Amino acid sequence: MNAQEMIAQEMDAQDELGGFRERFHLPKDVIYLCGHSLGLQPTSVRTYVEQELEDWEKLGVEGHFHARNPWMPYHRLATGKMAHVVGALPSEVVVMNSLTVNLHLMMVSFYRPIAPRSKILIEKGAFPSDQYAVRSQILYHGFDPKTSLMEVSGAEIVNAIESEGDSIALVLPGGVNYSTGEFYHLEAITRAGHDKGCVVGFDLAHAAGNVPLKLHDWGPDFAVWCTYKYLNSGPGSLGGCFVHERHARPGQIPRFAGWWGHEEESRFRMEPDFHPMPGAEGWQLSNPSILSLAAVRASLDLFEEARMDRLRAKSEALTGYLETLLHGRVDIVTPRDPARRGAQLSIRMPAGGRSICDRLAEKGVICDWREPDILRVAPVPLYNSFRDVFQFAQRFCAMLEVGSLRPVPLT
Ligand SMILES: *Cc1c(COP(=O)(O)O)cnc(C)c1O
């Protein structure tokens, strides 16, 4: 072990969250820096899921009311802890469906284009699913994406709202851009949007469980996210959805309805009139997958124990360490200001970069590649160590043939 590696080891020894690493299944013999794409499995997931398998095995349909955690209100077991992760009131949050589905459901309620206010503003380079979703909504309402879709770079979003806000129906950027890793100024964007009479929503796929969020205080109208990236709830797991308290009263806003959004007391009378539950729960359509929700619960229990403020402090240190090791050697496109990024650093690679990503995988380093030229690397504070970061940087820099790593101060 060289001096550098000992420094990393020392930082791990001082890390108060270091013990959480053992509570995840780490793929064997690899350095996993890909939690921005699919978070690792908490070891407790199996127990949570097995409990529901057992109850289903023993109780069949009776499990809806008589399982150890009855399935009918099961989604609520995730609500309070999820609300903590995104800085919301419990009544403002529900775990349901999946991300793009929730994005559409929220647009059904909150994108109400009436000329001359028909536009949707998204960030330039938004995740493709979001681009497809907003374009299809614009077309669905009889408008033309050529004139009704505004795509604006992060730094320009507030200015664009101030100059063109009167024509914008919905401001809908991501929280953290999937490609660059930039964390947008969501509070300022919300204020600018509301000042101009726009509805404001966020796609927090890369932000939830990664960066500090205060959705209730910032006051966007809605937000959606997934739980399989930083929230470690398993491939294809359920989505999260926030609807601000000011929209809680049923009947205010048009929505697509389903029975699971109906008031509980009268849901099983099966009457034709729809009476939604107040708050975000009233947007539910279907009874949710209990097996996936069990995994969400297992993961949220870890977040509750680790706490977002402590995770954020470690995340800034880990990502800062990664940046220190790479600084001056590669082209990092993620903002340098820790307040404007989460765990991920995005590196713009020269020609042939993709083969470096493949070779890293051969050498047991899992990060990922986004066309045309971005290598994404995310040290995740719940299960990554400073030593992971060091070992990544060492192997990566050796491949780039940019020499050995410089000494870094112990912070
Ligand atoms: C990961 C991600 C998605 C994926 O959508 P699913 O509906 O969960 O398949 C969509 N949008 C953004 C911004 C993402 O980061």
Image: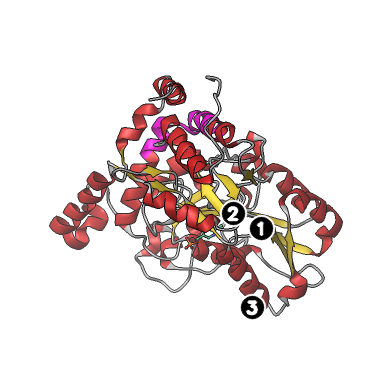
Residue 393's x, y, as percent? 49, 38
What secondary structure is found at the residue carrying circle 3? helix
Q: Is residue 268 left or right of residue 53?
A: right
Residue 3 in view of the camera: yes
Does 305 appear in magenta?
Answer: yes
Q: For mark 2, what is the residue?
A: 179
Task: Pick the residue in front: 354 or 204.
Answer: 354
Is the residue at mark 3 in contact range of ligand 1, meaning its CB lies under 8 Å from it? no
The foreground one among 42 and 171 is: 42
Q: Is residue 178 magenta?
A: no
Q: Residue at x 56, y 20 (%)?
A: 409
- Please name the amino acid that badge 2 sits on: Ser
Q: Identify the residue at horizontal 22%, vertical 56% (top origin).
A: 63
The 10 Å Cα crowd at callout 2, few under 14, some 14 to 19, many 20 or more, is: many
Report the span colored magenta: 301-319
Q: Quadrant for the C terminus, please.
A: top right
- SS of the residue under disc 1: loop
- Sequence-earlier tag: 1 or 3: 3
Can you identify the residue that label 3 sits on? Answer: 140
Q: Amino acid at mark 3?
A: Tyr
